Image: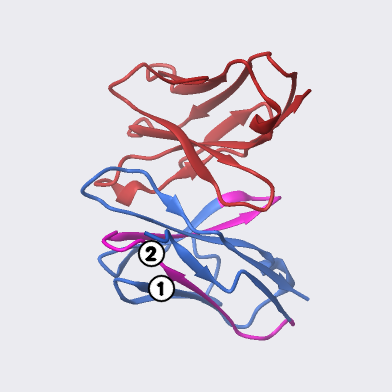
Amino acid sequence: DAGVIQSPRHEVTEMGQEVTLRCKPISGHDYLFWYRQTMMRGLELLIYFNNNVPIDDSGMPEDRFSAKMPNASFSTLKIQPSEPRDSAVYFCASTHGGTGDEQYFGPGTRLTVT
Amino acid sequence: GENVEQHPSTLSVQEGDSAVIKCTYSDSASNYFPWYKQELGKRPQLIIDIRSNVGEKKDQRIAVTLNKTAKHFSLHITETQPEDSAVYFCAASRGIYNQGGKLIFGQGTELSVKP
């Protein structure tokens, strides 16, 4: 398996623009997580899905952030409009609920908002 | 809310020495405790984990201990090597069937192993 795939790997955008981050979980995994990593706040969970359904979005910072999972192999995290404080590395992770708790992380998307 | 405290934030050791990183969690319902290693510019990678029904687990040079009563767990690395240099994160969760395995991470420890 190729592991969790994220795109793009790097994104530079101007304040006010819409940004869409993409994630393909490991095939067969039924849980998908979006994390954000910054120096100030560390690694924090934004939202997670089970069987494509959002279960807990309490970590989503504000209404500018939205996430979807239209099918078992694809999820998006959208920021509209983007702000400089959104600059961070965004990780997607997945796991299979039936086999354990280990979460497998994707390579991350480094977002810079100028 | 749920919280995981990790210490120290930086740790420098000589090659061959041991390194210990400690974490304390607040949620008494936590039952899964993974440790992740993150090299610069890379993704977090699981190096070892422990569940609440186990007090200690070893994997070659790495060991983790858990004290449920005190709500703390520790990572021990023996015979450290330069390639162990990275940022290490502890985390806690209630398990996949409770809150979906939502991981609460510690702040990270930057380990530097000097040759």
**Parent chain of label 1:** A
Q: Is residue B105 magenta?
A: no
Q: Are marks 1 and 2 in contact (CB under 8 Å)?
A: yes
**Number of numbered discs:** 2
The picture quadrant where one finds residue A38 is bottom right
- Which of the two labelled residues, at mark 1 and mark 2, occupies the earlier sequence position? 2
- Colour of the chain lettered B: red
Instruction: Locate residue B115 relative to residue B36 in the image: left or right.
Output: right
Residue at 67% x, 24% y: name it. B81
Instruction: Locate residue B85 relative to residue B88 in the image: left or right.
Output: right
Q: Name the kind of residue labelled 2 in the image.
A: Pro
Label 1 vs label 2: CA separation?
A: 8 Å
Instruction: Locate residue A16 relative to residue B95 in the image: left or right.
Output: right
- Which element type, helix, strand or loop, lies under badge 1? strand
Height in image: B113 above or below A85?
above
- Residue B76: image x %, image y %? 55, 19
Q: Which residues are magenta?
A: A14-43
Q: Nearer the viewer, residue B34 or B40?
A: B40
Which residue in the protein does label 2 denote?
Answer: A25
- Residue B45: image x %, image y %? 51, 44
Q: Residues within 10 Å of mark 1 (few under 14, many from 20)?
A: many
The numbered mark at residue A75 is 1
Q: Nearer the viewer, mark 1 or mark 2?
A: 2
Q: Nearer the viewer, residue B91 or A75?
A: A75
What chain is the blue one? A
